[in-house]
Image: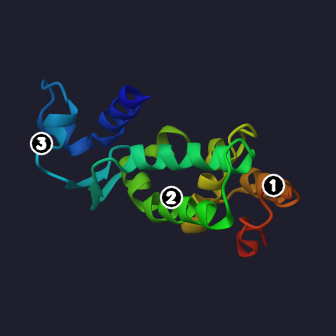
């Protein structure tokens, strides 16, 4: 799993500007974020635009918390509401960085809402749309309405998202 997280971080962290500047250079995690550096400024590699600060391990922390939520919400792992809330709070704080890294371009917002075997991933999708409601289309709206009917998600669907 650690290798997967490192691989995903390396791929999604590249920026278009960096790629253009160093077209012939292979990008590795250490060339993108040198040892001893904890954060860098990146533009979304898919859309460009303004650069935002991104910390190392952003994707890794998200994946770990999604997996924790999967366990908590499928009752495979004992948790109380504060454990669930803590994981959701961490993911919520990482959504802007995940967007900057291009993770929501690699897997579009709707794709985060459809895997019923991963409630943590679905909640991450819901959090994404709470940050970026302008990206809600009819397909997403229909899925959010469907999720709202589920006891598992009804507390996490923000009503204003699906007016």
Point out which mark residue 34 bears.
Answer: 3
Disc 2 secondary structure class = helix
Q: Is residue 90 above or below residue 73?
A: below
Q: Tell me the crowding category of disc 2: few under 14, some 14 to 19, or many 20 or more residues within 10 angstroms, Cα based.
A: many
Q: Is residue 36 visible?
A: yes
Q: Which residue is mark 2?
A: 91
Q: Which residue occupies 48% across, 38% down? A: 106
Q: Which residue occupies 37% across, 50% down? A: 58
Disc 3 secondary structure class = loop
Q: Which residue occupies 78% across, 51% down? A: 143
Q: CA distance from mark 3 to mark 2?
A: 25 Å
The extreme front residue here reads 78
Q: Position of residue 37 (x, y in %)?
A: 14, 51
Locate residue 32 relative to residue 122 in the image: left or right. left
Q: CA distance from mark 1 to mark 2?
A: 19 Å
Q: Position of residue 147 (x, y in %)?
A: 81, 55
Locate residue 10 relative to residue 92 in the image: left or right. left
Q: Which residue is mark 1?
A: 147
Q: Is residue 92 above or below residue 43?
A: below
Q: Position of residue 98 (x, y in %)?
A: 42, 52
Q: CA distance from mark 1 to mark 3?
A: 42 Å
Pair 1/2: label in front? 2
Locate residue 66 relative to residue 24 in the image: left or right. right
Q: Tell me the crowding category of disc 1: few under 14, some 14 to 19, or many 20 or more residues within 10 angstroms, Cα based.
A: many
Mark 3 vs 2, N-terminal side: 3
Q: Within the image, what quadrant is residue 111 found in?
A: top right
Mark 1 vs 2, N-terminal side: 2
């Amino acid at each position: 799993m650690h290798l997967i997280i490192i691989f995903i971080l390396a791929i999604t962290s590249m920026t278009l500007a960096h790629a253009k500047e160093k077209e012939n250079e292979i990008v590795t995690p250490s060339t993108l974020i040198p040892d001893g550096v904890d954060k860098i400024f990146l533009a979304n590699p898919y859309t460009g635009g303004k650069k935002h600060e991104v910390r190392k391990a952003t994707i890794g922390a998200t994946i770990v918390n999604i997996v924790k939520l999967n366990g908590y919400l499928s009752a495979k792992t004992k948790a109380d509401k504060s454990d669930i809330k803590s994981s959701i709070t961490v993911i919520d704080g990482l959504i802007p960085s995940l967007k900057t890294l291009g993770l929501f371009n690699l897997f579009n917002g709707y794709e985060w809402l459809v895997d019923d075997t991963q409630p943590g991933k679905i909640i991450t999708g819901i959090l994404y749309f709470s940050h970026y409601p302008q990206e809600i289309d009819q397909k997403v709206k229909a899925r959010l309405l469907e999720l709202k009917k589920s006891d598992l998600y009804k507390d996490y669907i923000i009503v204003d998202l699906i007016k």
